[in-house]
Image (cartoon, rainbow, N blue to C red):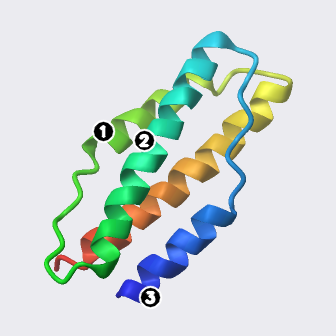
Amino acid sequence: MSSLIGNAMEAHEKLVFPDFPDDDDFSDWMAELAELDGYYAGLAMSNLGASNSRKINKDALLEFANRLAQFSSLEGDDRGVFHASEAYIQSLSKIVDIANAKQK
């Protein structure tokens, strides 16, 4: 299982963090994404080597991902940032899912 987490982490690290958008509210959301990324990736890394790992509560990540939808109608460069953000959230969510599958 740890190789799955390791592979997911490696793939996530290869993703380029999305650019900061022009829209102020979306830019604030992006700053929160940077914090959540560190938090959830850190928890998953802690579980990677732990023999007694804990289930990671994904509620905040899911709520945060749902908030991304409010920016779906943005246009121009921010549209590309929106799609990059979707992919980034999906990657982070996959890491948490794999880490939590270790609990079963």
Residue drawn at 55 percent across, 28 percent down: 31
Please give the residue where the numbered disc 2 appears in the rendered image.
36
Query: Is residue 43 shown above or below 82?
Result: below
Q: Earlier in the sequence, mark 3 or mark 2?
A: 3
From the top left corner, tell me how far across and down residue 72 is, in percent.
Answer: 64, 27
Please give the residue where the numbered disc 3 appears in the rendered image.
3
Q: Which label number is shown at residue 74?
A: none
Query: Is residue 81 shown above or below 3?
Result: above
User: Mark 3 Cα within 10 Å, few/some/many (few <14, many 20+)?
Assistant: few
Q: Earlier in the sequence, mark 1 or mark 3?
A: 3
Looking at the rendered structure, the kind of residue marked 2 is Leu
Identify the element where label 1 is drawn. Answer: helix
Q: Quadrant of residue 42?
A: bottom left
In the picture as drawn, the residue positioned furthest to the right comes out as 76
Distance of mark 2 from mark 1, alpha carbons? 9 Å
> In the rendered structure, are the residues bearing label 2 and label 1 in contact, judged by CB atoms less than 8 Å apart?
yes
The answer to which of 49 and 16 lies nearer the viewer is 49
Looking at the rendered structure, the kind of residue marked 1 is Ala
Q: Quadrant of residue 50?
A: bottom left
Q: Is 80 on the left-hand or right-hand side of 68?
A: right
Please give the residue where the numbered disc 1 appears in the rendered image.
60
Residue drawn at 26 percent across, 43 percent down: 59
User: Mark 2 Cα within 10 Å, few/some/many (few <14, many 20+)?
Assistant: some
